[in-house]
Amino acid sequence: MKKKVLIMLVIGSLMLLSAGIGAYAASKMTLIVNGKVASAEPKVINGTTYVPLRAAAELLNATVGYDKGTNTVTITSKADTSRNNSTAGGPNQPSQSASQLGFSRKNPAPIGTTLSFDQSGILEKYSGEMTLEEVIRGQEANDLVADANMFNDEPDAGYEYLLAKIHVKITKNNKSDAAVDINTAQFTLVSSDGKDYSRGLVVPPDPDLNANLYEGASASGWVAFQVKTTDASPLITFGRKYDGTGGLWFKP
């Protein structure tokens, strides 16, 4: 029995040694994030490069957490206070004071209001402007959706379509050569009693809001939602945190 255990230990040691040789076979690599050199070194294992999560996150001004109970890793960017004394939170979260018009569910911006915001996330950081330009709902919206695509369904019983024309401009991007993706899936309609409407598969009328925008570029387009015919005061939101707070809020 002792001999068998000894053999297994020798085999295990050889396997670990082989793995170590494979990991360090490539020349030493350096991790640079936003111009800063990380103290941790990337590893190449079986042809795949692995980057230490915490080291990269800290250089991106983010924190890494681990919930042992749910076996979940979370990455959260720190508040971006670079503009207008803002107080925002997590990844991809427009930063601004919640007391200001358009930056909380309780204080939505009306049609025609332009909101300036900072978007700060793990992989992107940019500034922009957003305006709710026009809203159409009811039978007119139903007809426009039907004409937009032959495969669009009629609204569910008790519902009607709501079309929102939204203008977005990217005023600054930390990655000057990168484009920011803006699309209809990033917007959510919230009922007047505080429940997210589900997003159906619908093609909005032309032009739909689906654009890759470089710094200085802008686009306007339609976003389509289904809303209860009895819901007089739904809200449109963009860029909320995972818990539903923050983001931009508009009142159609």
Image (spheres, rainbow, N blue to C red):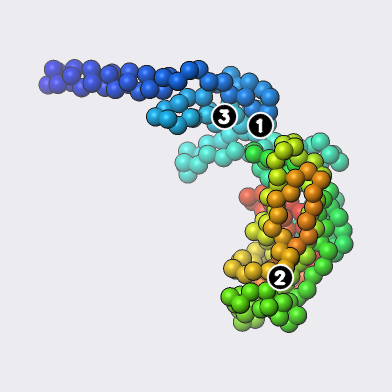
Q: Image quadrant of residue 176?
A: top right
Dot 2 or dot 3: first in sequence order is: 3
Between circles 2 and 3, the one closer to the viewer is: 2
Dot 1 or dot 2: first in sequence order is: 1
Residue labelled with disc 3: 54
Residue labelled with disc 2: 205
39 left or right of 20? right
Dot 3 or dot 1: first in sequence order is: 3
Amino acid under label 1? Leu
Q: Residues within 10 Å of mark 2 (few under 14, many from 20)?
A: some
Kindly indicate whether the residue at mark 3 contacts the one at mark 2 (C-beta within 8 angstroms): no
Observer-nearest residue: 250 or 204?
A: 204
Residue 32: image location, x then y, percent? 62, 24
Amino acid under label 2? Pro
**Circle 2 SS class:** loop
Observer-nearest residue: 203 or 68?
A: 203
Residue labelled with disc 1: 60
Between circles 3 and 1, the one closer to the viewer is: 1
Residue 193 in view of the camera: no
Q: Above or below — where is 122 with respect to 24?
A: below
Q: Residues within 10 Å of mark 3 (few under 14, many from 20)?
A: some
- The quarter in which the C terminus is drawn is bottom right
**Circle 1 SS class:** loop
Amino acid under label 3? Arg
Q: Residues within 10 Å of mark 1 (few under 14, many from 20)?
A: some
Q: Residue at x 26, y 22 (%)?
A: 12
Gap between marks 2 and 3, in whole Å? 44 Å
